[in-house]
Image: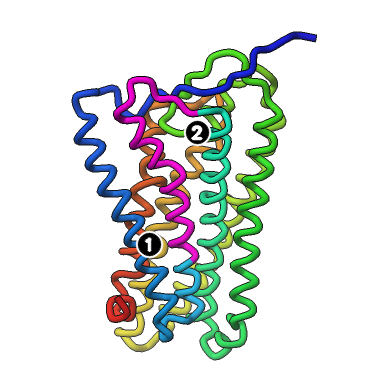
Amino acid sequence: MFNHTRVTDFIMQGLFDHPQHQRLIFGLFLCFYMTAIMGNSLIIGAIAIHPPLHTPMYFFIANLALVDILCSSSVLPKMLKNLFQEKKTISFDGCIAQLFAFTLSSGTELVLLTAMSYDRYVAICHPLRYVNLMSKDICISLAAGVWAVGTINSLVHTLLMLRLDFCGPNLIQHFFCEIPPVLALSCSSTYLNEIMIFMADIFLAMVNFLLTTVSYSFIIIAIFKIQSSKGKQRAFSTCSSHLLVVSLYYSTIIYTYIRPTSSYSLDKDKMVAIMYTLVTPTLNPVIYSLRNNEIKVSC
């Protein structure tokens, strides 16, 4: 038996090592964060109060907006606060809470993107059966399943993190508490954690990406069969926006998680993390909704 002094707080390395640029970075990131919160909140409000938007597609867009708010809010407020602190600390409990919230949002978004691609598949490939296949009860069940999967996944990783001992270095090589850099600080075996991370990512990332790819393969085939050029253009416009966000999000998530902790690269991972915690939540309202005439009218 060995006695270990448990770490009570962590020190974050921060985003950039250029103090002279802190104010500029703070202003830029604050603008992005406020844009993400206001844009996604506006989308949720418009969909909630405007009856013509009470359709399965907009129902899932509202869920996506909620996920994006959770993702940005779990990371950005603490990061912005730390920009003006010489010692960028976070309590152990605060770190675990941040890790849980961020893992919940990222896992939920992966499954939600698959549900959204299925909705588009049914709408384009089976338009006559769309009302029955995407009824209100089915949509609510799909959304509940999406959030349940994300919650269970996050809870499993959080509980596995709590069983570890943190008794040595407490410097997190990142600007927020994410699974790989926190695991790197553990003074006990992380073998089970890495196995569960790999298994979860095979399901959440690879399987969902495969399902999304299959859905869009059928969609593209169906679009080529459309006789009207306007119909093709409209369908391609909707699909291209979704595919752009799916490709961006999956590439960052797979790069971050489908690899061993030993290959963790600080500088590259910070840039990638900015993409899926700040840039993607800001762009999603524009890509998915603000380009839609019905959203513009309701707003």
Residue 224 vertical placement versus 89 (above, below): below
Residue carrying label 2: 177
Residue tagged by mark 1?
40
Q: Nearer the viewer, residue 129 or 99?
A: 99
Identified at 47% across, 81% down, the residue is 54
Name the residue type under label 1.
Answer: Asn
Residue 28 at x, y percent in the picture:
23, 42
The quadrant holding residue 260 is top right
The image shows residue 56 at horizontal and vertical percentages of 51, 77
Q: CA distance from mark 2 to mark 1?
A: 24 Å
The residue nearer to you, when weighing 267 against 150, is: 150
Magenta-tinted stretch: 63-90
From the viewer's side, name the closer residue of 245 and 139. Answer: 139
Question: What residue do we see at 64% from left, 38% from top?
Answer: 158
Circle 2 crowding by C-alpha within 10 Å: few under 14, some 14–19, many from 20: many
x, y (%) of residue 171? 48, 19
**Which amino acid type is shown beneath numbered disc 2?**
Cys
In the image, farthest residue toward the top: 2
Above/below status of 42 relative to 210? below
